[in-house]
Every structure is written in C-alpha cells, then in structure tokens.
Image: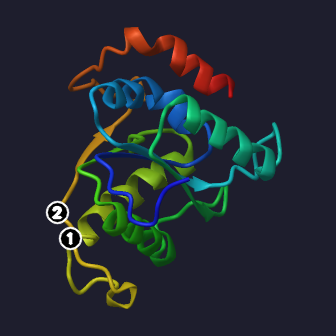
Amino acid sequence: MSPPETQIDVLAVFSHPDDAELSVAGTLLKLKSLGYRTGVCDMTRGEMGTRGTPEIRAREALEAARVMKLDLRLNLEQPDGHVWPTEVARIALVRVLRKHKPKVLLTTHEDDPHPDHANTCRIVREAARLATMARYDEEGNQSPVAMPAIMHSLFSRRVVPSFIVDVSDFVEDKMASIRA
C-alpha cells in the first residue's frame, strides 16, 4: 500500500488489525487533515480472533486504511496471542522505523491488560531506541534514525492521561474505519 521508501510523520503500531482503528483512528484522521503523512503497522494478522480469518482481516485493514486516508499500512506477521519482545520482533520494527522514519509513534500503554498490547508497547519503546543505534542490526544495511516521540493511547483506568486529542470532527470517519 505504499512506495518502497514512503517517509511518514506518524506511525501507529498496534497488536492486531482493528486496534489502531479502535484506539487512534480519530487522531490519525485529524493529523491527516493537518497535512501529516500517517501510517499503521499491525504486529499480527489477528489469526486468533474469533471473528474472521487472517485473510478477511487483511482485506478489512486495507479498507480501514482507505477510510483513514493512510499513506502506509503494514503487518509484521508476528504470532497473534504470542507477541513478545523478541529479537525477531524488535528487528522487524527497527527496520520499519529506519525505512519510514516516523517522527511520532502511537501505541498502546504498558498497563494494557491484554498481553499482546502490553508487549507491543514494550517492543515499540525498545525498537524506537534501538533504531537510533548505528551498530544495532547492521545486517539490515539501514542508517540509524532520530528517536521518535512516543504517544500511548490509554485503556487502563489506573493511568491519568497527560493530554487529550479532540477528534470530535472526525468521529464519523473513525466509526467508518471501525465498521470496515
């Protein structure tokens, strides 16, 4: 869904196809309306989900990407229900960060009760830092990047948000992305 070297401003990294739609679609739509290049990277294909197959979920993710006007939609194909901060997962995300050079990452909060979500947060934080290190993953033949800012969407009631994004003008399209 993108040219090989698409540079984006904001990348949402979530565990499953539909997590970004449910969490930050309004924010992505607002940023897009302000002229920013946006993308979503799903860690898994959602194969453990009770509704739909990975193939159906992939088609739904592409339709949701169209609704959200994304410049990029990727899937790292990590095992659903078994997302862990392994070297394989970290390198996969480091390579995405180095290729697309986002300035801001959106992801779940480490306090999210779903293990895949909490581990995705950890992978994002670690990969963002590792992507800045020239000697990490030298086999990937990519240059290090500047550390992106990281924004966590909240699910937990135990964490007080530090800011709130008003997406009132984008609720209709957010809901359309969820229905997709």
Q: Tell me the residue at 45%/66% (across/down).
A: 4
Q: Quadrant of residue 90?
A: bottom left
Q: Is residue 15 above or below residue 123?
A: above
- Residue in the foreground of this view, choosing between 58 and 135: 58
Q: Amino acid at mark 2?
A: Ala
Under circle 1, the secondary element is loop
69 displayed left or right of 136: right
Give the number of the disc on residue 40. none
Q: Are marks 1 and 2 in contact (CB under 8 Å)?
A: yes
The residue pinned by badge 1 equals: 132
Residue 146 is marked as 2
Give percent across and percent down for residue 15.
55, 49
Mark 1 packing: few (<14 Cα in 10 Å), some, or many (20+)?
Answer: some
Residue 67, percent across and down?
A: 56, 29
Q: How many residues crowd around disc 2 within 10 Å: few (fewer than 14), some, or many (20 or more)?
A: some
- The residue shown at (48%, 73%) is 86
Is 136 above or below relative to 81?
below
Q: Is residue 158 visible?
A: no
Q: Amino acid at mark 1?
A: Thr
Question: Which element type, helix, strand or loop, lies under badge 2?
Answer: loop
Q: For the point 29% across and 37% down, which residue is it? A: 36
Residue at position x 77%, y 51% in the image: 54
Percent position of residue 34, x then y: 27, 27
Q: Residue furthest front?
A: 3
In the rendered picture of this protein, how many numbered marks are placed on residues? 2
Q: Is residue 27 left or right of residue 112?
A: left
